[in-house]
Image (cartoon, rainbow, N blue to C red):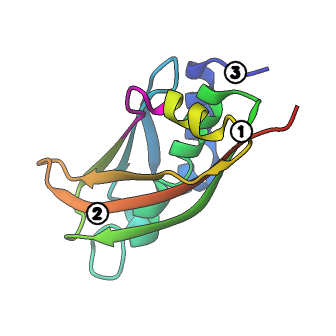
């Protein structure tokens, strides 16, 4: 049984790694196609020079593409994070945000590429922006997707 989006959001916000780092899911579309996450600068995620700790910036982006695709594709697919990297562009101060969106047609493309049992490794990107909308970091995620054998 899959919990409804509002409950899933509530539980994610109570998940200890997010709660401890100050990461908050602010918006979660009922169909899991759009998620917005925010991170306020605080004592628990501040580095030595007073800006956002890089690990917290990466953590705020870690599971979302995987969770979104798992929910959208359903139980007939394996969906895992395969790899990820982050490019730090400028120091993060104040509240930063990341918005995850599944592009139209993406699910059909995944289903087409995996229909014969092949794995598919899409490369996805999400930007972390500050309060002024300026780029703080860019995160790249490679996912592993494969249709389960029946």
Residue at 62% x, 22% y: name it. Answer: 7
Frontmost of labels 1 and 3 is 1
Which quadrant would residue 11 be assigned to in this image?
Answer: top right
- Direction from residue 108 to residue 97 in the image, left or right: left
* Residue 44 visible somewhere in the drawing: no
Q: Which residue is mark 2?
A: 137
Cα separation between marks 1 and 3: 30 Å
Residue picked out by circle 1: 116
> In the rendered view, would you say 29 is above or below 86?
above
Is tag 2's residue or tag 3's residue first in the polypeptide sequence? 3
- Label 3 sits on residue: 3
* Magenta-span inclusion, residue 105: yes
Secondary structure at badge 3 equals loop
Q: Circle 2 sits in a helix, a strand or a loop, which is it? A: strand
Q: CA distance from mark 2 to mark 1?
A: 36 Å
Q: Is residue 98 magenta?
A: no
């Amino acid at each position: 049984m899959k919990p409804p989006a509002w409950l899933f959001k509530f539980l994610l916000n109570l998940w200890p790694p997010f709660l401890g780092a100050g990461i908050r899911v602010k918006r979660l579309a009922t169909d899991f196609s759009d998620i917005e996450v925010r991170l306020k600068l605080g004592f628990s995620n501040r580095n030595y020079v007073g800006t956002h700790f890089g690990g917290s910036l990466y953590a705020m982006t870690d599971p979302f593409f995987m969770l979104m695709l798992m929910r959208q594709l359903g139980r007939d697919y394996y969906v895992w994070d395969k790899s990820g990297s982050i490019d730090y562009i400028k120091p993060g101060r104040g509240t930063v945000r990341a918005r995850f969106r599944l592009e139209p047609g993406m699910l059909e493309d995944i289903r087409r590429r995996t229909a014969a049992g092949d794995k598919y490794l899409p490369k996805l990107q999400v930007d972390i922006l500050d309060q002024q909308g300026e780029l703080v970091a860019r995160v790249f995620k490679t996912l592993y997707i494969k249709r389960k054998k029946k």
